[in-house]
Image (cartoon, helix red, strand yellow):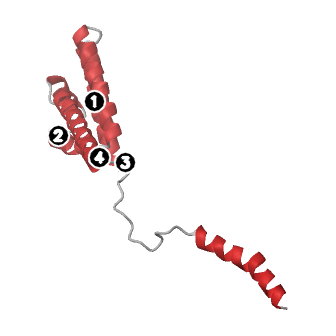
């Protein structure tokens, strides 16, 4: 009987206890060390500042276009006031703002190159103005 108990301990219980003891890490109950974030705070801050600068540049691009004589004429034709437009532009998302700024830059470049006349530029200004107002009204 003593021999079977000894065999049972050496063949079954002892290996099971060893597996359990070695399965857990040594520092399971220790205080976790200060871990680095996946993205460094400085990198995150730099990206946030760059995004803010791009957004501000896009706002200025659209506002400058709409404050030009063509933009003023477009506002008169759509019966909108400059204050309505100036308060609506900052409420656009970054993607909407980037899209409008790209369209404005493209239209101004084509106008400077002579591909567009005043009439075409006015139509584009009206379209951009209506697009801004519709986006803001939908929200």
Spatial CA span between label 1 and label 3: 20 Å
The residue where tag 1 is placed is 101
Tell me the residue at 30%/38% (across/down). 132
Spatial CA span between label 4 and label 3: 32 Å
Please name whichever residue, 136 or 7, is drawn nearer the observer in this view of the structure: 7
Question: In the picture, residue 116 is in which quadrant?
Answer: top left
Q: Earlier in the sequence, mark 1 or mark 3?
A: 1
Spatial CA span between label 2 and label 1: 20 Å
* Mark 4 secondary-structure assignment: helix
Q: Earlier in the sequence, mark 2 or mark 1?
A: 2
The residue where tag 4 is placed is 44
- Image location (x, y in percent) of residue 96: 34, 38
Vertical arrangement, residue 37 with respect to residue 57, above or below: below
- Image location (x, y in percent) of residue 71: 19, 28
Q: Nearer the viewer, mark 4 or mark 2?
A: 4
* Mark 2 secondary-structure assignment: loop
The residue where tag 2 is placed is 81
Please name whichever residue, 64 or 1, is drawn nearer the observer in this view of the structure: 1
Q: Nearer the viewer, mark 4 or mark 3?
A: 4
Q: Earlier in the sequence, mark 3 or mark 2?
A: 2
Residue furthest top in the image: 114
Please name whichever residue, 65 or 60, is drawn nearer the observer in this view of the structure: 60
* Mark 1 secondary-structure assignment: helix
Spatial CA span between label 4 and label 2: 38 Å
- Image location (x, y in percent) of residue 69: 14, 24
The residue where tag 3 is placed is 138
Q: Is residue 118 left or right of residue 13?
A: left
Q: Nearer the viewer, mark 3 or mark 2?
A: 3
Would you call the spot at circle 3 few (<14 residues within 10 Å), some (14-19), or many (20 or more)? few
Please name whichever residue, 8 or 79, is drawn nearer the observer in this view of the structure: 8
Question: In the picture, residue 104 is in which quadrant?
Answer: top left
Q: Is residue 21 left or right of residue 136?
A: right
């Amino acid at each position: 009987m003593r021999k079977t108990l000894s065999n049972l301990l050496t063949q079954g219980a002892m290996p099971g206890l060893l597996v359990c003891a070695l399965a857990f890490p040594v520092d399971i109950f220790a205080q976790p060390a200060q871990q680095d974030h996946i993205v460094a705070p400085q990198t995150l801050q730099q990206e946030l500042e760059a995004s803010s600068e791009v957004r501000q540049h896009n706002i200025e691009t659209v506002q400058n276009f709409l404050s030009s004589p063509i933009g003023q004429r477009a506002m008169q034709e759509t019966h909108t006031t400059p204050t309505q437009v100036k308060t609506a532009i900052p409420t656009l998302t970054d993607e909407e703002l980037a899209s409008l700024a790209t369209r404005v830059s493209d239209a101004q470049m084509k106008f400077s190159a002579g591909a567009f006349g005043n009439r075409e530029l006015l139509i584009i200004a009206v379209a951009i103005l209506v697009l801004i107002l519709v986006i803001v009204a939908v929200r």
